Amino acid sequence: MTSHNSSTRSAHGSVHGSVHDSPRTTSSSTRKTSSRRKASTGGSSRRGRAMPQRQHRSRSTRAMKWLEPRLLLITTGVTLFGALLQVVAISTDSWLVMKAGGRPSPPLSNMTTSHVAEAYMGLWRFCRVEVKTRMMLDGTLEETSHESCQPHNLFPSKDEVQQSTEYERHHLDYTRTAIAFTIIALVIMVIGHAFAFYALRRPRYIIKRLAALLHLMTAACLLVLNEVFVKTAKHEKEKMADHVPQDGRSDYGYSFVLSWLVFVIFVLAGLIFLFTSHKKKAEYADGTEALEDEPMEIRR
């Protein structure tokens, strides 16, 4: 009997203990469930906020991926056209054009007079247009024009240097400097286009930056060339009164304008290549682009 009663008490105690413990267990499980719900709700809200940002980034990345190669291709085509314009500019003589202000007085009967009606200068030679006017016996005027060009003497002999004036020595220095920067600009232009074509085929960021640097160096050489020619033109107009038209006006010709246009083209091309030379993040780049942005290793 005693054992039966004790077992009965223990059973009742366990029942009462389980009854008393069940609210605690229920409340703790409720708190865990609510915390999980909050965590899942917070995570889903964060994911919901992150999804539009990722979609916006993916759209912008796709747009840049579509735009960059086409922009570089168009830029390279424009620089090729600019190189052609620069060749035309340095091959022609219309850098500085000087024209006579008025007509001279007519000659006497059966006499001939001559005057310089126009003069123009390029990087390689200086040209003059001389007009001869003759009064015929019947009182009519007969005009004939003759054009003569003289190349710049870039390599005078020692005797010519000793006999030259200060003006001629300054003119020689200006001309040599202009031609030297012309040749340097053409060489850098060719190398820059080689890197530009390679960047179109293999769009590594380092190749794009090299192409941008070479385009900007070309623009710098053209800037020096044009500024040196401005100094040369001022020197010509001040010191060369016997070779230019009297009481005339002087203007820069189309060759000079083309050279400045090519300068602007290569500045813009260098900035475009520099702008598109950024490294793409790995999560927004495909396998090929990620490989292209890896550093180059040169091994023997």
Image (cartoon, helix red, strand yellow):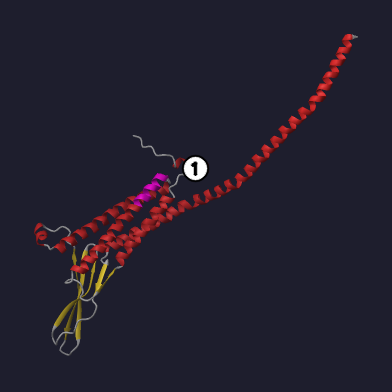
The residue lying furthest to the right in this view is: 1
Q: Main secondary structure of the magenta part?
A: helix
User: Which residue is pictured at 18% across the width and 61% down the height?
Assistant: 170
Q: Is residue 239 above or below residue 35?
A: below
Q: Is residue 206 magenta?
A: yes
Left or right, residue 277 beside residue 57: left
Q: Tell me where the magenta segment starts and ends, as one range.
A: 204-215
Q: Is residue 121 magenta?
A: no
Location of residue 208 in the rendering, given as x and y in whole percent from the top left corner: 40, 48
Residue 51's image quarter?
A: top right
Location of residue 263 in the rendering, given as x and y in whole percent from the top left corner: 34, 59
The residue indicated by pointer 1 is 281
User: Which residue is pictured at 21% across the width and 60% down the height?
Assistant: 174
Residue 178's image quarter?
A: bottom left
Nearer-the-camera pick, 52 or 61: 52
> In which quadrant will I find the C terminus?
top left
Task: Identify residue type, mark 1.
Answer: Lys
